Image (tube, rainbow, N blue to C red):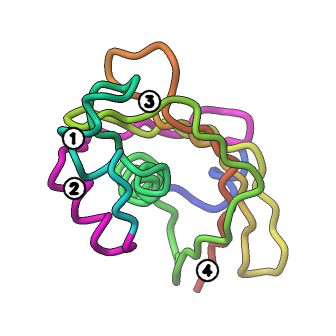
Amino acid sequence: MISRDEYIAMVGKEVGISEWHLVDQGRIDAFAAATEDHQFIHVDPARARETPFGTTIAHGFLTMSLLSVFSYEALPQLRDVAMGVNYGTDKVRFISPVKADSRVRGRFVLTEATLRKPNELFTRTSATVEIEGEDKPALVADWLGLVYFK
């Protein structure tokens, strides 16, 4: 646990790297069911083998949604927090596809931390989703958050 001021002092620094997480066909299928996005490139391994990827790939939004679990593992915990809120993104780019059975992790750099009210901290974090064994990341994003203190 660190203080709000200690966290603010981390602007410009890498603040965490998550564990690796498997993105298997079961996870891809569950995401397709939840979002009703059943495009064959995600859910039909036979047809996907005929594409340049040679296999099914995760939905870009599935990859992006994993930022939450990555952040729980990687970001410092702040003292006296009432709650944190996902405030959105200013920029997201899906750089490389995440092929089924790949492992991914999140890497975070705190780029802004501004106290907007006495108990509200606005944060901007550069988030990168790395694919194990790949040179290019799956995703890069400017992720915005609000942290409310007790």
Disc number placed over residue 72 in the picture, else none = none
Upstream in sequence: badge 2 or badge 4: 2
* Magenta-span inclusion, residue 101: no
Q: Which residue is mark 3?
A: 130
Is the residue marked by circle 4 packed among few (<14), some (14-19), or many (20+) residues within 10 Å? some
Q: Is residue 119 left or right of residue 99?
A: right
Question: How far is mark 3 from mark 1, CA to CA?
Answer: 12 Å
Q: Nearer the viewer, mark 3 or mark 2?
A: 2
Upstream in sequence: badge 1 or badge 2: 1
Q: Nearer the viewer, mark 2 or mark 4?
A: 2
Residue at 48% in and 57% down: 61
Q: Picture coordinates of residue 28 (x, y %)?
A: 26, 54
- Looking at the picture, which amino acid does disc 2 mark? Arg
Q: Which residue is mark 1?
A: 22
Q: Which residue is mark 4?
A: 149
Question: How far is mark 3 from mark 2, CA to CA?
Answer: 18 Å
Q: Is residue 74 left or right of residue 80?
A: left
Upstream in sequence: badge 1 or badge 4: 1
Residue at 36% in and 57% down: 69
Front residue of 109 and 41: 41
Q: Which residue is mark 2?
A: 27
Q: Nearer the viewer, mark 1 or mark 4?
A: 1
Q: Are marks 3 and 2 in contact (CB under 8 Å)?
A: no
Q: Are marks 2 and 4 in contact (CB under 8 Å)?
A: no
Front residue of 72 and 3: 72
Is the residue marked by circle 1 packed among few (<14), some (14-19), or many (20+) residues within 10 Å? some
